[in-house]
Image (cartoon, helix red, strand yellow):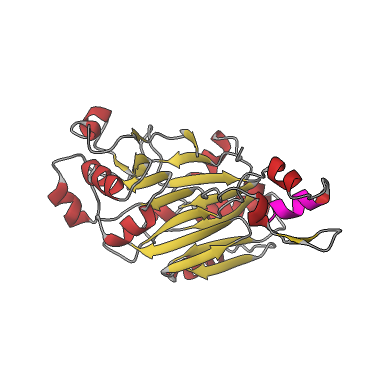
Amino acid sequence: MAIPMQVILLGTGAALPTPERSTSGTAVLYEGETLLFDCGEGTQLQLRKAGLRHGRLSRIFITHMHGDHVIGIMGLLMTMELSGRERPIELYGPPALADYVTTSARLLSTGFSYPIIFHEAHPGTVCQTETYTIECQPLNHRILTFGYALQEHDKPGTFDVARAEALGIPKGPIYGRLQRGEPVTLPDGRTAHPHDVLGPPKRGRRIGYCLDTRPCPEAALLARDADLLLYDSTLAPGAEQEAAEKGHSTSRQAAVLAKEAGVKRLLLTHISARYTSARDLLTGLEGLHDDFVLARDLMELSV
């Protein structure tokens, strides 16, 4: 059974922090690694409230340079410095991100003894590891803004022990090598291939992250067949014109896009401070998508 990906919502509000909603920040925990998407004001405190260790934080992905998505990054970086961090941290985002961090460090007369590695976001693959890929696309906001998708690599299919025995493949380390996708030369000289004993590959999980955007083809591309999609739902149904003017989406538009993209579960987030009742954002969404939930701070979901 696959180890669950844990998604922890550190901030689910738009623009203005409120007692109920901090500004944007989402942590994804996967195989001992913590990835952070956006870093609004107070994210380092939200990490502590969620019981997350910033020592496991390896990569931060910033969507754009509006303050409610990036203003918390200096506090987080400085906290890691004071905590004695030594391992590198990798930052991904618009070109201005590196300038923002280095200029802020200079003006604050601070420095970092651990390496900070900057990567400019661009359409396509921006990060690839042995177990997952991070995809990136430009969104449709008022300034340069990127969305991201975490795509887990496909897993090998189930090992068919009965088939292996029927083929005369001896038990032991050979099974493990075939399971990892390696062809193996058997003691009798034959070559056993993984497809001889493995079932169909298991599709990797996918998490889409599209905040601060009007509905657009690039958002739909990142959302395609996602197991979980975090999507801009700044305004309630009926406020589509205002959302378009401000570069955002309504919860209704989020549900329609998610349905068309084949999203399994939709998380409505980046909620305007004007809304104190979930009813305002959820009314009229019935039938538009089969599985949607309104985000709240410190909510945890498994994928």
Asked whether, in this view, residue 1 is left or right of residue 12, the answer is right
Image point (33%, 44%), residue name: 270
Boundaries of the magenta span: 174-180
Q: Is residue 298 above or below residue 38?
A: above
Image point (34%, 34%), residue name: 291
Q: Is residue 16 above or below residue 247?
A: above
Asked whether, in this view, residue 167 is left or right of residue 152, the answer is right
Tell me residue 81's x, y (percent): 66, 55
Residue 40 inside the magenta-drawn segment: no
Tell me residue 156's x, y (percent): 61, 51
Asked whether, in this view, residue 19 is left or right of residue 44, the answer is left
| Quadrant placement of the N terminus | top right
Asked whether, in this view, residue 24 is left or right of residue 287, the answer is right
Depth check, front residue: 15 or 217: 217
Image point (72%, 61%), residue name: 183
Tell me residue 256's x, y (percent): 24, 45
Q: Is residue 124 above or below residue 260?
A: below
Tell me residue 128's x, y (percent): 57, 63
Image point (67%, 48%), residue name: 55
Residue 178 inside the magenta-drawn segment: yes
> Which secondary structure is most common in the magenta stretch?
helix
| Observer able to see residue 104 | no
Depth check, front residue: 101 or 153: 153
Residue extending farthest right: 187
Depth check, front residue: 241 or 133: 133
